Image (tube, rainbow, N blue to C red):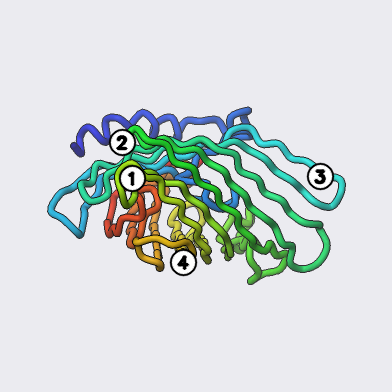
Amino acid sequence: MRHIFFLIFLPVVVLGQTTSKKTSWFEENVSIRKTFDGSKNENKPATFALFEDHRSDNDFISADIAIKIVEWELFENTGSILSLFPVVEYHRSSNDNDEKDKLSAGLNVEYYLGNQGILRPYLLSNFAFKRNLLESTNEIKYVGQLSLFGTKPGQPGYKLRFDNEEGDYKGTYYPYLGFEYNEIPDLIAEGEIENLSIIFVRVFFEYWFSPKSVQFILNGIYRNLISASTIKNDLPLVNLSLNYYPGNQDKISIGLDYKNGYDPDSKFTKVESTSLSLKLNF
């Protein structure tokens, strides 16, 4: 399996090392990430992984990739900015305890209110239609989030820089308060659709230990179920990533990932896993 894994993605690595530095249409209009569950500025690379599962004896493969297609920005000259962009995501896992094969398409909206003041509030909204390919069923998900964007060091969204000639990007963080709504068939009883209303708090934190070399990402969320259901009311999930980017570039990396909690893409199944991943960040 390891040989197949590297043979598939070796051409991608070579391509990433030889790509021209000139900005292309692709770079300006398309972004590839692991998911777009928060701001488009969150730097979560797409992953192709070989996992070791702590809850069973089986290893498995996994893929998490999201593509943001052409973005439209409105109200740029009014002090506020409204950004809209379609997103396509694919999440696949062959883990017996976390098996999934899910394709989704949706629309993300980001609205930044005004350009005055030290902290600017902004709203995120995402509506997605999901196809569960394993069970041939459809799911619906809506997420609305509120966060803040700062202009001074230490504030949310402020981009820290290294003290070097180029001022390479060093890191940032975003806190979120949000509401989530899911329609999931066969979650509790076969043939029935479960409607889940959830409030949550989420934190995204990114830090580079050295420029374009070693990156750490924390993406944690605590969900609380507010609708009547027989599943757990408290649904925490944490993802930790340590990524190494060889060759002084920030597009392709090798990552070590740890996930622990209730995964919404697996019907909120309790999961705990460690993975070694090949990652893409465009």
Sequence-first disc among 2 and 3: 3
Sequence-first disc among 2 and 4: 2
Sequence-first disc among 2 and 1: 2
Q: Which residue is drawn at 46% across and 51% down?
A: 195
Q: Where's residue 266, x and y in %?
A: 34, 49
Q: Residue at label 3?
A: 76
Q: What kind of residue is marked 3?
A: Glu
Task: State the CA–CA distance, disc 1 to disc 4.
Answer: 21 Å
Sequence-first disc among 4 and 3: 3
Q: What kind of residue is marked 1?
A: Asp
Q: Which of 243 and 265 is in front in this view?
A: 265
Which image quadrant is residue 21 in?
top right
- Tell me, for residue 224, which label it has, or none: 4
Residue ranking furthest to the right: 78
Q: Could you tell me which secondary element the residue under label 2 belongs to?
A: loop
Q: Which residue is drawn at 58% across and 33% down?
A: 69
Q: Kindly check if marks 4 and 3 are in contact, taking CB atoms under 8 A apart as contact.
A: no
Q: Where's residue 264, x and y in %?
A: 40, 52
Q: Could you tell me which secondary element the residue under label 1 belongs to?
A: loop
Residue 223 seen in the figure: no
Q: Could you tell me which secondary element the residue under label 4 belongs to?
A: strand
